[in-house]
Image (tube, rainbow, N blue to C red):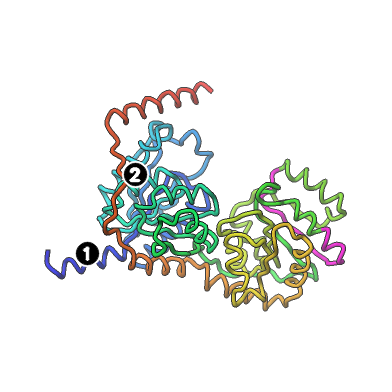
Amino acid sequence: MDASTLLNNKMQELNSIAFVCHPYHRGGVTRWMADAAIHAANNGWNVYFVTVTPNKPFKNAGGRETMEQLLTPFKKAITIITEGAGYEFEFGTERYRANTYSKLLQSNVPEGVAVIPSDDSATWAAAADVADKYKMIGVLHGDQNYYYNIAGKYAHQLSSAICVSGRIKATLASKYPCIDSGKSYMIPCGIVLPEVKRDYSSNGVTKLIFVGRLSDYEKRAYDLVLICSGLKEKKISFHLDIVGNSEESKREYSTLFDKKGVREFISFHGWQPAAKVQALLNGADILLLTSNSEGMPLVMMEALAAGCGFLGTRVSGIEDFEHHDYAAKCLAVYAVGDVTDAVSKLVALANIPETERVTAACHMATKEFGMEVCMSRYQEMIKIITNNNIKPMKLNVSSIEIIKSKLRATLRNLKMYVK
């Protein structure tokens, strides 16, 4: 192979990326993978998307669309690599699924390409199986032991570990110092920035919004009740839209808000499609996030991109932007559970002139969270990382193991059928 061909192959490698993903769109991670693939392909990258396509809907599909369906409109730009899969895949062993992904990857993606597995452990195992042939990029999407442990398991197969927040990067270094610090990068996942369409009809009422499960375990939803009570005590005119509640939680929290005398200022919307959520963000002044923990909250990025101010707890992802250049005009952070401070900072945010708050929020979103910024950071990282001297964690799935997996899948499928 002459020098010109080698150089051309190297340039192709640096401008290529592959995603390995489970078959169904589950929001969050899978939405980011699809958006990242589409953006990269539209900007001249060679993009490969490896998944499987259910022969018929999986038992646990829950009515979701498949990744292939999601990406089919972009198949001219993205190389979608897939094959049909049935119950033997859905109910088979993790190693069986990983082996399927690995074979698809090796048969269809040029060696040397950077590979990003989804949050499914089988996709990580598949990438680790061929880590000597491809650059394995593991993305830690949350401040959770699952992500730290899976990164630690494949510490010696990773060409790069991407942490979506500073806290995750620091925790990974503490838990698994065997992962070379030079391989660890902080890159928040990006979003497709919407066209800003603000609704300025506030009429002197501070419009608040909460998007998420109305539960008190991770989301500390009861703090919403206390915050609203605090606003009433300060004689602040407000209205809170809650998106994502169930009918059960609506009944429960209606009673809780009523006991504090603020029920009339609350609207429950339940689950809503993305377009409706966007419309509510467009009309809101400030989004509230009361969580005990996060990774890098998508809803924070979406709110700021819509020109909506943000108040959240000092947790992973949020804390990284507490002192950002634009934060003083659009973002405030308080300690988990410190409702008094939350109310004070909420009032301060509400008192910032709306045009200033909207401008700062949009500038922050564009500078930090746009998909263009995200993928530019990935491209710079891919230019640097290497898989030299990396030994793969081989799957070595035998034909006997495949037969056992299929037998197990048959039995599990029969059990589901009987149910």
Which label sits on residue 306? Answer: none
Where is 222 relative to 319, above or below? Answer: above
**Is 160 placed left or right of 287 in the picture?**
left
Residue in the image at 55% along x and 66% along y: 194
Quadrant housing the N terminus: bottom left
Q: Which residue is mark 2?
A: 101
Q: CA distance from mark 2 to mark 1?
A: 24 Å
User: Where is residue 383 shown, x and y percent of the image?
Assistant: 33, 68
The answer to the question of whether label 2 and label 1 lie on touching residues, with beta carbons closer than 8 A, is no
User: Is residue 234 in the magenta section?
Assistant: yes
Q: Amino acid at mark 1?
A: Asn
Q: Which residue is the site of mark 1?
A: 9
Among the two numbered marks 2 and 1 on one chain, the one whose residue lies closer to the N terminus: 1
Magenta residues, start to end: 229-246
Location of residue 36 by image quarter? bottom left
Provide the secondary structure element on which disc 2 rests.
helix
Q: What amino acid is at disc 2?
A: Tyr
The residue that appears at 25% across and 47% down in the rendered structure is 107
Q: Is residue 259 magenta?
A: no
- Tell me the element at label 1: helix
Instruction: Please indicate whether residue 402 sits to the left or right of residue 22 in the image.
Output: left
Q: Position of residue 101 (x, y in %)?
A: 34, 44
Q: Position of residue 368 (x, y in %)?
A: 52, 70
Residue 18 located left or right of residue 28: left
Is 292 situated above or below 53?
below
